Image (tube, rainbow, N blue to C red):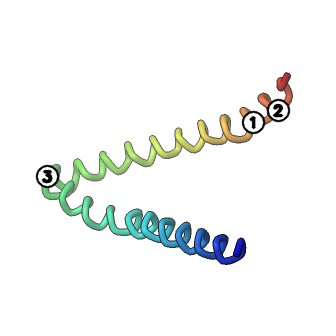
Amino acid sequence: MKLSKLIDESKANFFIYGIGQAFNLVSPIIIAPYLISICGIASFGKIGLGFAFALFLILIVDYAFDIKGIKKVAENRK
């Protein structure tokens, strides 16, 4: 009984994760042509550069909080 519930939950989680990944793959294909038509090719390049820089900063912040922050919390636990 417990095993069948676990399998059903795993299938549901897999399905939801798959929908999220499909959205992540399809959304840039839909959004990019719209942005190019609104902004133009040159402005789209500037948007892409700004987006890449923002993702780089997010990567640094995530590293700091996920790796170093967890260590600090574990060390200062009461």
- Report x, y in % for residue 74: 82, 32
- Mark 3 lies on a secondary structure that is helix
Give the residue type that dot 1 points to. Ile
Q: CA distance from mark 2 to mark 3?
A: 49 Å
Which one is in front, 55 or 45? 55
Mark 3 nearby-residue class (10 Å; few <14, some 14–19, many ≥20): few
| Lateral position of residue 41 relative to residue 28, left or right | left
Rendered-image quadrant of the N terminus: bottom right
Indicate which disc residue 13 carries: none
- In this figure, which residue is indicated by the disc labeled 1? 70
Name the residue beneath numbered marker 2: 74
Task: Describe the element under mark 2 as helix, strand or loop.
Answer: helix
Q: Are marks 2 and 3 in contact (CB under 8 Å)?
A: no
Q: Position of 22 compared to 10: left or right?
A: left
Q: Closer to the camera: disc 1 or disc 3?
A: 1
Q: Marks 1 and 2, Cα distance to the nearest angstrom? A: 6 Å
| Amino acid type of the residue tagged 2 in the rendering | Ala
Q: Is disc 1 surrounded by few (<14), some (14 to 19) or many (20+) residues within 10 Å?
A: few
The first of marks 2 and 3 along the sequence is 3
Q: Residue at x 44, y 63 (%)?
A: 20
Q: Nearer the viewer, residue 70 or 11?
A: 11
Q: Is residue 14 above or below residue 44?
A: below
Q: Earlier in the sequence, mark 1 or mark 3?
A: 3
Residue at left 71%, top 75%?
3
Q: Please, which residue is most extreme toward the left here?
A: 38
Mark number for residue 38?
Answer: 3
Image x and y of residue 12, in percent: 53, 70
